Amino acid sequence: MTPTPQPARPGHALEELVEALRRLPGVGVKSAQRMAYHLLQHDRPGALHLSGALRQAAQSVRHCSRCHTFTEADVCSTCADPRRDTRLLAVVETPADQAALERSGSYNGLYFVLMGRISPLDGVGTTDIGVERLLQRACDGTVEEVVLATGFTAEGELTAQALATALKARGLKATRLARGVPVGSDLEYVDLSTIAYALHDRR
Amino acid sequence: MTPTPQPARPGHALEELVEALRRLPGVGVKSAQRMAYHLLQHDRPGALHLSGALRQAAQSVRHCSRCHTFTEADVCSTCADPRRDTRLLAVVETPADQAALERSGSYNGLYFVLMGRISPLDGVGTTDIGVERLLQRACDGTVEEVVLATGFTAEGELTAQALATALKARGLKATRLARGVPVGSDLEYVDLSTIAYALHDRR
């Protein structure tokens, strides 16, 4: 990763900034203009701070060699924590999903972060999400159960099914998070397929 | 404007980036995370490009000494254009509004960009939007008519009224963009107050 300072077009710094902001996901030309005007009019220290944070992150953040999440060290702090239960490995789509599991306070195992999910419509297949890397990690002799914690969307389910097949072919135990009625829901507002799953998996 | 490189907290580059992205208008913590993950996972050149564009713009963009819009020169290209009609001065809220007037192809005068509007709820008054600077600019002896082209929102109308009062007190002619039915509209879908204005100002 070599930093390549972009040659600035003299006299077009504002247009260049709007163009650069448009590359952020979910930001169109109107939002990019609003962001640029805001930073230049009201928050130049914020613009310089963001500039430094972008450069720093792009240069120093890499992937944990064990769980593939973002980290600046070779192994992330979660993988390096000796108090974690090394027999459990939860597979999640993103670091945000990992953080959600952590916040629940109910999981003390380790993680594997796919950094994506299988999506045939976007041309993302099993190789793109690093299934081989996951299989290597899961076959370290310590992991006893892989908890598939990908999302309960169509793409998340597809990913979980593909991973379950690959893991079982290696003789590994793969489980899936339970589907059911969310805590705090009135039944009348819960969608039908969730109720169907909750009935089927009743206990 | 002195660039102040931010001291990076070692090991927290990702968190720092998310925090810095949250300072952009309209970006909450979820969007900031999505942006940071996207840049680090799929577009590191984009992150470095944005970093450079932010630094360049924050350091080189200033205000035109005549119309107050963003520019890197002392006087912006529009104010410096000798083909412009110097007797007309349109007052707009933002560079985006100025661009909209330009795109219409119906205006060949000069501009004054407020970079804001009066907003009592946000504590923005007449001094904050540079009314003194506008009066100085409009009293250069060449301007014959000030076209108030602030928005037709409550705040834009308030701003236009305040400016009209101040301009007329100096003996300057102030006009306002016409209100009426937008081109391409079916009358049945036009709101009532617009129809009332269109009836009142019929010609």
Image: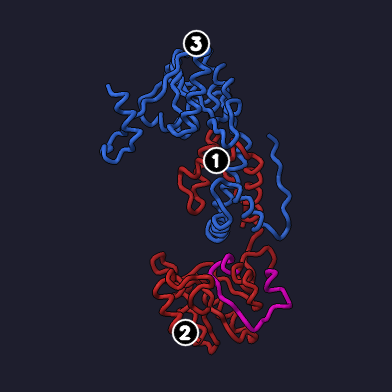
Chain colours: A red, B blue
- Residue plotted at (52% across, 13% down): B169
Closest to the observer: A64 or A176? A176
State the image coordinates of residue B81 (x, y, percent, origin top left).
46, 21
Mark 1 and mark 2 on one chain: yes
Residue A201 numbered mark, or none: 2
Per the model, the C-alpha gap separating discs 3 and 2 is 80 Å
Q: Which residues are magenta?
A: A76-98
State the image coordinates of residue B141 (x, y, percent, origin top left).
51, 10
Residue A36 numbered mark, or none: 1
Q: Is residue B133 above or below residue A87?
A: above
State the image coordinates of residue A186 (x, y, percent, origin top left).
47, 71
Per the model, the C-alpha gap separating discs 3 and 1 is 36 Å
Q: Secondary structure at mark 3?
A: loop
Q: Secondary structure at mark 1?
A: helix
Q: Secondary structure at mark 2?
A: loop
Residue B171 numbered mark, or none: 3
Q: Residues within 10 Å of mark 2 (few under 14, many from 20)?
A: few
Q: Left or right? Give the position of B189 relative to A167.
A: left
**Amino acid at circle 2:** Asp
**Viewer-nearest of discs 3 and 1:** 3
Decide if residue A29 is in sight here: yes
Q: Are marks 3 and 1 in contact (CB under 8 Å)?
A: no
Tell me the quarter of the image containing the C terminus of chain B. top left
